[in-house]
Every structure is written in C-alpha cells, then in structure tokens.
Amino acid sequence: MCNQMIPYDEYGSREHPTVLLLHGAAALNTFCCQYCLSSKYHLIVPHLCGAGKLANRAYDPEWMKRELFVLIAGLHKEKIGIIGHSLGAQLAVMLVCERPERFCFAVFLSAWVNPTAKAIRRYCRFAGLAAGMLHCKWLVRLQGRYWRYTKAQADDMAAYAASITLQVYRSFFENTLDLKRLPTYATLDLPMLAICGSGEVVDMKTSLALLGENAHCRTLMLSQAGHDFPMRRAEALNPILEAFIERFKAPS
C-alpha cells in the first residue's frame, strides 16, 4: 500500500500497536523473519531509497525523513514504535531525534554512526563491483534465500535490484549518519535499544558504544551474529524485540 508519495507494505491489524520497520540498504525484506510479529503488532515497512519501488532513487536522508513523517502522520496514531536495521537504523536515529514525541520506543540494529572519510572512500571504492553483482539475478536470488527470504521475496529482490545503479549504491555510504551532527541525541529520554552482532566490524561496535552513551539507550551485542542477524539469527533476536516492544508499546 502507499500514501501520496512513499510506498509501503503492511502486515497485521491496524487495531494493534504500530511498529515502523526501516529496512537495510537495498534489502526491502530485511525483517522477513520478524513479520511473524504481525499477529500482535501492526507492522509498516516503507520502501526506502535504493530498494523495492524506490530502487532507482539515490538515498537522500533529508527527503526520506520528510516522506516518512508524512507516512507517520497518515497513520493517525498518537505514538508508534520504530525499528531500523543498518541504513534504516540510521534513519530511525534521525527520526526520533527530530520528533521524539511521535515515538514510544526505538530500536537500532547495526546502526553505523561514526563514519570517517577513509571508511567512506573504502566502501565507495567497491560500489561499482557491488552494484554490478546486484544485476546478476541468480546471485541476488541466492542471497535472498540465504537470508531466509521466501521464493517470492527473493524473486522480488532480484527484479528491483537490477535498477540499483552505481550512483544509488554509493549514496548509501556517502550519506552515512554522523552521530556528532545530532547533538539532541544525547538528551533523548525515549526508551531505546541498540544491538549489533559480535561478528561485525569494529566501526559497528564503536557505534554501539556511542549510542549507549545516552542513559536511556540499552545496548546489546548478539553472540555469533554478523551484520545480517535480523534474518540469520532471528531465533535469538525476536524474543528480545518482543520483550522490548511489550514493555514500551503504545496502547492499541
């Protein structure tokens, strides 16, 4: 479904507490293994720049923020929860910093928030190769199935990934959030949870520590987990998410 501008997918009854799920870069169904929570919660999955119906649009965090706030306003709920992974987690941090009154809780999964010019150059250097691989449909389908996507979800990713250009892929890294540019984060009193995998890169673990400097943000490192733990380690992640949502969810 969609509002006037940004497309989104919807799971569960609108009568349940609403949780906004912001997927990772180029991976619309990052939360495929969390859709089961729709039996208790109303899940909204916007198509972010570089994925789904917006696959050919370069990632612009300011534009995305504006569109997401339009979507949130259209839900006609006083407060909602928000969970983001990777690129989506960066957006989640930005959204709650700008309008904390719209959210009852926030969960940041593998949010990279301490970029350096050297790290961005390193990732951008391989953007051409990565974007080219996304145009190989059998390889994208294989990646989807490894991530525990259904066949339909893997086929969909293979179809939209063909629209992801070098410019789009580079934009994921060129617009990485630097937490130092969000001074309001330090004073947020929203219930927050930040998680990364024990097998992730040092920058991600440093980011976890930075997010944890806010006294209202609990941090957790998930053992035996890489960057794709929402898909690959859902059996460990989901009970943590559900317990957190149950504690801080808004009334139905």
Image (cartoon, helix red, strand yellow):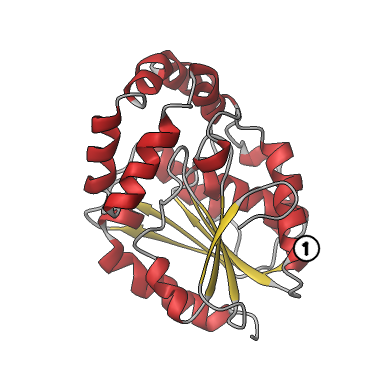
Left or right: 94 as drawn, with respect to 40:
right
- Residue 149 image offset from top left, x and y in percent: 30, 52
Q: Residue furthest bottom?
A: 251
Query: Crowdedness of circle 1 by 10 Å Cα count: few (<14), some, many (20+)?
Result: few
Q: How many marks?
A: 1
Q: Position of residue 127 (x, y in %)?
A: 42, 19
Can residue 181 be seen by looking at this rendering?
no
Of the pair 224 and 28, the residue shown nearer to us: 28
At x 43%, y 76%, the residue is 242
For the point 70% across and 52% down, the residue is 68
234 displayed left or right of 204? left
> Would residue 233 be visible to someone looking at this image?
yes
Judge by depth and name the residue closer to the eye, 162 or 219.
162
**Percent x, y for residue 180?**
66, 39
- Residue 101 lies, with reference to residue 40, above or below; the image says above
Judging from the image, what secondary structure is the residue with disc 1 in?
helix
Q: Is residue 111 left or right of residue 234?
A: right
Q: Camera-side residue: 148 or 190?
A: 148
When the figure is inspected, residue 134 is found, relative to residue 218, above or below; the finding is above
Q: Provide the residue designation for mark 1.
A: 73
Residue 223, quarter of the rendered image: bottom left
Report the amino acid beneath label 1: Ala
